[in-house]
Image (tube, grey):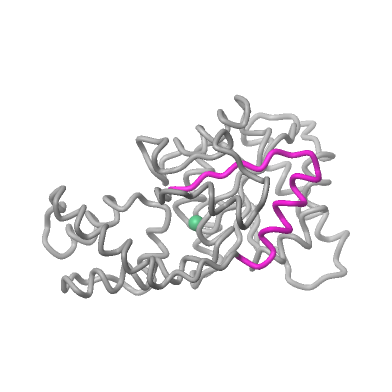
Amino acid sequence: MKTAWPHSSGLAVFLFIMIEKIIKDYLESHHYSRFDMKAVIFDMDGVLYDSMPAHDKSWQQTMDELNLRHEPNEFYLHEGRIGKSTIDIIFQRNLQRDATEEEEKRIYARKSELFQQYNSGATMTGAKEVLEYVKAAGLLPILVTGSGQPALLGRLDTHFPGIFSRKTMVTAFDVVNGKPHPEPFLLGLKKGGNLSPNQAIVIENAPLGIEAAVKAGIFTIAVNTGPLPDSVLTDAGASLVFGSMQKLLQEFPGILNAVNTIFNQA
Ligand code: CA
């Protein structure tokens, strides 16, 4: 069963029964008897930073400048892909061919330039508290992002002091295959200390990121911080969907308690 988390409070027993079923389903389908929680893997854009509106606006403007047609909310659906892949999809639709390397470089450079203009750098409300909660709970926070911005670690350390290190980050520079391929998350598990999928959970906001994490075999929680319907995230494989990082923060103690105490006896 996959379902969106109810938004009202005071339903603790009902919620526990629901999450118990969701967790048991995960354990059973992945042939685990229990979780052995060591880490929480975080996506970055749309989870830790409120940067997706700026990404979306920059992609749209870049493609408009080239008279290349794009669909409503398309760039939210492509979120997590490496730039080349997104550009080729637009090129195939409009020009029935992939972009050349030169075109890709030029287009991605323009998109990045616009992003620098539009991005406020704001963190997602509640993100810092979720990270601090995870750390205080004795779990390792790991970052898995498709982003390839230089100086990422410096920026992360400014906004979320002491949470991530180079050893606990997977970026665009570390992988051959970007999301929706599972490689980034499999590398995240490896960087976390050769972890098994049942030793971590993933927090993601984008359908392709969720797909990648689920393919890596990891229990995946979605935070729906963008314009897509929750159903897109559950269809991608998210076990739970929350409307914001604040909502996730509220329920996180209960979720951790559930993953630490629920066993699959089947
Ligand atoms: Ca994201």
Q: Quadrant of the image for the C terminus?
A: top right
Q: Residue 230's spot in the image, x, y percent?
A: 56, 66
Task: State yes or no: residue 174 in magenta.
Answer: no
Residue at the top extreme, as displayed: 194
| Left or right: 210 as drawn, with respect to 220 | left
Residue placed most toward the observer, 263 or 206: 206
Q: Residue 95's spot in the image, x, y percent?
A: 11, 62
Relative to 264, is 223 above or below? Answer: below
Q: Residue at x 53, y 64 (%)?
A: 231
| Left or right: 20 as drawn, with respect to 142 | right
Q: Residue at x 63, y 52 (%)?
A: 221
Task: State yes or no: residue 143 in magenta.
Answer: yes
Relative to 161, is 50 above or below? Answer: below
Q: How many marks?
A: 0
Q: Residue at x 23, y 69 (%)?
A: 63
Relative to 20, is 92 above or below? Answer: below
Q: Residue 18's spot in the image, x, y percent?
A: 77, 55
Residue placed most toward the observer, 155 or 192: 155
Which of the 4 image quarters holds residue 3? bottom right
Which of the 4 image quarters holds residue 69? bottom left
Q: Residue 163's spot in the image, x, y percent?
A: 66, 46
Which of the 4 image quarters holds residue 16? bottom right
Q: Residue at x 70, y 49 (%)?
A: 22
Residue placed most toward the observer, 238 or 163: 163
Query: Which residues are the magenta region?
Result: 124-146
